[in-house]
Image (cartoon, rainbow, N blue to C red):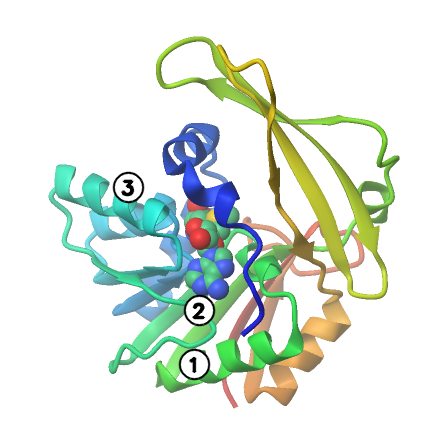
């Protein structure tokens, strides 16, 4: 398996949570999909449980899977605090074996962009197919590559986010990037300005870009049939002006 290059990015799971505490744009979408498919549900790359906890709180039987100990530890402590019964699993989405099947498996929030090569993707798709019930659905959400963003001036710094530091002041994240059209990997660097630290903290956040026709072919040649493609979390049909590509598929 190819080396994963984002460990530092998710090491500070408390910062991840603070950065995303107001991001709720996709929650209604997953609630709606979950009510259509029913449980049991598996979230791939569940992180700190932003979506997992929301679905569990609505009564869905859900399992979360992630490769980052730090992210999962925080997820687990939040579910304990909220008295939610969630099965958390430390595993790689490219090779998981849970010995049970799900009516819905979803891979949200651009997390598939962390899988950079074809072997990793093929092995992810095999694992997903092995864990889907016969009528189960696989949902994957990611942005559509945006050339204005990918080809920005790499010597310039662009704002990403600012959020309160757990103790004092605020953390400010800026970024720059260099996109490699040959590998379709956007080499992003995030720079954290943390109160009280003279030097910025620098982490890699490299994202593989998937073009719509390419991703549809990947699903097709890996044993999936696409039911629907949405262009946003409001379930608008996917089109040439969509900024998101959200696939609902099932085993072919
Ligand atoms: C952007 S976060 C998304 C977290 C959560 N799903 C959310 O929506 O807030 C991406 C997550 O993907 C996880 N991840 C990336 N590659 C993975 C892999 N190969 N196997 C399992 N988890 C992975 C990271 O550890 C991180 O928690």
Vertical placement of residue 18 versus 38, above or below: above
Rendered location of residue 4, percent (x, y): 54, 60
**Residue drawn where x is 87% and y is 44% of the image:** 151
Residue 199, position as x, y percentages in the image: 60, 19
The answer to the question of whether label 2 and label 1 lie on touching residues, with beta carbons closer than 8 A, is yes
Q: In which quarter of the image is residue 70?
A: top left
Give left or right: position of 200 versus 147.
left
Tell me, yes or no, whether the two marked residues, 3 and 2, touch with CB atoms within 8 Å: no
Residue holding disc 1: 127
Q: Can residue 204 be seen in this view?
A: yes
**Vertical placement of residue 20 versus 134, above or below:** above
Q: Of marks 3 and 2, which one's residue comes earlier in the chain?
A: 3
| Numbered circle sitting on residue 93 | 2
Q: Is mark 2 on a helix, strand or loop?
A: loop
Q: Where is residue 245 in the image (x, y as percent from the top left)?
A: 65, 59
Disc 3 marks which residue?
Answer: 74
Label 2 CB-ligand 1 distance < 8 A: yes
Mark 3 C-beta closer than 8 Å to ligand 1: no
- Give the Cα separation between the discs numbered 3 and 2: 19 Å
Q: What element carries label 3?
A: helix
* Residue 192: image tag: none
Q: Quadrant of the N terminus?
A: bottom right
Which image quadrant for residue 202?
top right
Question: Residue 116 vs residue 151: left or right?
Answer: left
Task: Give the residue at the far left of this rendering.
Answer: 83
What is the residue that sits farthest to the front in this orientation? Answer: 198
């Amino acid at each position: 398996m190819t080396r994963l290059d984002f460990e530092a990015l998710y090491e500070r799971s408390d910062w991840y949570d603070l950065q995303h505490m107001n991001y709720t744009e996709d929650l209604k979408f997953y609630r709606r999909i979950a009510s259509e498919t029913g449980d049991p549900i598996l979230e791939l790359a569940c992180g700190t449980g932003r979506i997992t906890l929301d679905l569990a709180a609505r009564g869905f039987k859900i399992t979360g899977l992630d490769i980052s100990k730090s992210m999962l530890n925080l997820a687990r402590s939040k579910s304990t605090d909220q008295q939610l019964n969630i099965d958390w699993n430390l595993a790689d989405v490219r090779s998981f074996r849970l010995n049970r099947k799900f009516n819905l498996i979803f891979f949200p929030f651009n997390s598939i962009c962390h899988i950079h090569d074809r072997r990793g993707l093929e092995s992810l798709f095999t694992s997903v197919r092995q864990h889907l019930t016969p009528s189960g659905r696989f949902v994957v959400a990611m942005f559509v590559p945006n050339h204005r963003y990918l080809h920005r001036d790499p010597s310039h710094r662009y704002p990403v986010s600012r959020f309160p530091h757990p103790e004092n002041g605020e953390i400010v994240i800026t970024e720059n990037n260099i996109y490699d059209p040959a590998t379709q990997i956007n080499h992003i660097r995030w720079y954290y300005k943390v109160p009280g630290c003279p030097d910025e903290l620098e982490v890699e956040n490299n994202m593989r870009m998937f073009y719509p026709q390419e991703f549809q072919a990947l699903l097709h040649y890996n044993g999936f049939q696409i039911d629907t493609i949405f262009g946003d979390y409001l379930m608008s049909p996917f089109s040439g002006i969509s900024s998101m590509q959200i696939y609902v598929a099932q085993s072919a």
